[in-house]
Amino acid sequence: MALHKIISILIICYFLMFIPFSMAHIIGGFKKDTNGITVQFISDPSFVIQNEDSNLVFSIQNATTGKGLERISVIINIFYGISLIQSYTDLDIIEGDFSLKHNFKEKGIYEIEVEILTEKETISTIFLLQVTPKSLLEDMTFYVTLGISIIIIMLIIINRFSQINKK
């Protein structure tokens, strides 16, 4: 019975890892605080695939109040290694929130630089983004499914043994 409880707790912890954490304007993603400003970033889809369009979503707020910043200009620079791939400057920012579409041509790690130009200063922060080929994502899905299947089979076996021992 104790083993059954331990496995149940492990399963619950496993599934809790996949629940997105909530903060300010974006649910999930990444958050950085710099000089009183909170910058959030998330990609859609969460696993960015090489040669497919991705939606990059940003939210910029006052770190104290959580309200979106107004009267700011933002530049998004996308780097692959040391090479600047693309700069986005003409962004439609509504209450600190905006998004853009980008197609990542190469697999690997990209740097997404967010430059915020306020009336007082320029603030810059960087997020890393992993871009994978489609086959790697399919492999990850297989392994996650396999892991869940093994856990379910173990629970069924434990349940059967506990029922046999009760008789």
Image (tube, rainbow, N blue to C red):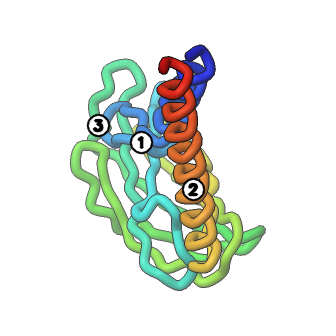
- Position in image of residue 1 (x %, y %): 56, 16
Rendered view: 159 above or below 128 = above
| Image-based side of 140 in relation to 66, left or right | right
Q: Earlier in the sequence, mark 2 or mark 1?
A: 1
Q: What is the distance, in whole Å, between disc 2 and disc 1 at their CAs?
A: 20 Å
Q: Nearer the viewer, residue 140 or 22?
A: 140
Mark 1 or 3, which is nearer the eye?
1
Q: What is the distance, in whole Å, between disc 1 and disc 3 at their CAs?
A: 17 Å
Badge 1: few (under 14), some or many (20 or more) residues near its Cα, within 10 Å? some
Q: Residue at x 47, y 42 (%)?
A: 18
Rendered view: 160 above or below 85 = above
Q: What is the distance, in whole Å, between disc 2 and disc 3 at their CAs?
A: 37 Å
| Image-based side of 29 in relation to 7, left or right | left
- Position in image of residue 124 (x %, y %): 58, 46
Image-quadrant location for residue 102: bottom left
Q: Residue at x 57, y 70 (%)?
A: 137
- Residue ID for mark 3: 68
Rendered view: 138 above or below 52 = above
Image-quadrant location for residue 120: top left
> What secondary structure is marked by label 3?
loop
Q: Earlier in the sequence, mark 2 or mark 3?
A: 3
> What secondary structure is marked by label 1?
loop
Residue 33 visible in this rendered orientation of the protein: no
Q: Earlier in the sequence, mark 1 or mark 3?
A: 1
The kind of residue tagged 3 is Gly
Image-quadrant location for residue 20: top left
Badge 3: few (under 14), some or many (20 or more) residues near its Cα, within 10 Å? many
- Position in image of residue 74 (x %, y %): 42, 54
**Residue 28: image tag:** 1
- Residue ID for mark 2: 144
Mark 2 or 3, which is nearer the eye?
2
Q: Nearer the viewer, residue 86 or 116?
A: 86
